[in-house]
Amino acid sequence: MDKGQNMDYLLRLRLFLWLGALGFFSPSYGEPRMPKEPTLPSVPNEESKEPRNARGDKDSGESKVLNLTLCDGRTVRGESTSGSQTIFFEHTKDGILYKKKLSSNELDSIKIDSWELKLKREEKKGTTYEALPKKIRIRTKNGEVFYKETGIGDLKLLNIEIKNNNGETTLFTYWVDLKFPDGKWYSGLPTIKADHLVREDCLKDVVRMMEWE
């Protein structure tokens, strides 16, 4: 190999090593990438199955002004499209079971009197329960009062979306609580008897009463 070929060989070798070094230290090749955490699928419930129009968009209900009272006495006022425009329910009057239909325009207020604790799952630190509305009072604008013993899930009022000057938020008429082995609750609410899974007190951020203007 003559001197010229030797110089050419050395230049090619240096160029190869230089390109190899770039590839090794390049962020796209040399640095490990953390895998993205997968998005957990959401479990649809009855409230999420809202009617949709022909284009597949959600049909927005008529906006109403609601006054919400939370369990600690705070109040929130704003516009909301949550809830059914027409509600159907069964109620008992003088020992007789009736079926009733009301439009949202007839409603004055709905108050939750009690919540039923339903077992959700066992945890390492205790047992998780879902506290769902059980006994409610429905008052109409003409002063009629009806008692309903099956909650408000069928009325689509477990989640209430509110919009006012402060912005938009979602409030809830139920909550999830953890019961420790000693009978105490993560929420700090009073203990209840083991065989009594209905309570009248509630978490401070939960909606106890809804009033329509």
Image (cartoon, rainbow, N blue to C red):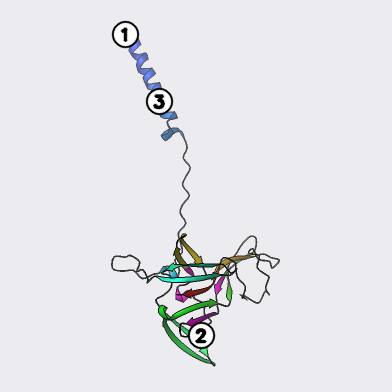
Residue 100's image quarter?
A: bottom left
Question: Is tag 3's residue or tag 2's residue first in the polypeptide sequence?
Answer: 3
Question: Is tag 3's residue or tag 1's residue first in the polypeptide sequence?
Answer: 1
Label 3 to label 2: alpha-carbon separation: 82 Å
Specify few, some or many for label 3: CA neighbours under 10 Å numbering under 14, 14-19, or 20 or more: few
Callout in the foreground (3, 1): 3
Question: Is tag 1's residue or tag 2's residue first in the polypeptide sequence?
Answer: 1
Estimate the x, y position of residue 212 in percent, counting from the top left.
Answer: 46, 75
Amino acid, disc 1: Gly
Give the camera-side residue of 161 and 115. Answer: 161
Magenta residue check for 22: no
Q: Which residues are magenta?
A: 131-159
Picture layout, residue 28 above or below residue 113: above
Residue 12's image quarter?
A: top left
Estimate the x, y position of residue 169 in percent, counting from the top left.
Answer: 47, 62
Q: Which residue is mark 2?
A: 145
Instruction: For the C terminus, give its image quadrant.
Output: bottom left
Image mark count: 3
Callout in the foreground (1, 2): 2
Magenta residue check for 136: yes
Give the camera-side residue of 193 and 170. Answer: 170
Q: Residue 2: tell me if it is visible.
A: no
Specify few, some or many for label 1: CA neighbours under 10 Å numbering under 14, 14-19, or 20 or more: few
Label 3 to label 1: alpha-carbon separation: 25 Å
Specify few, some or many for label 2: CA neighbours under 10 Å numbering under 14, 14-19, or 20 or more: some
The residue tagged with tag 3: helix, strand or loop? helix
Q: Which residue is mark 3?
A: 20
Q: Which residue is mark 1?
A: 4
Q: Can you name the residue that lies furthest to the top here?
A: 3
Q: Are marks 3 and 2 in contact (CB under 8 Å)?
A: no
Instruction: For the N terminus, give its image quadrant.
Output: top left
The residue tagged with tag 2: helix, strand or loop? strand
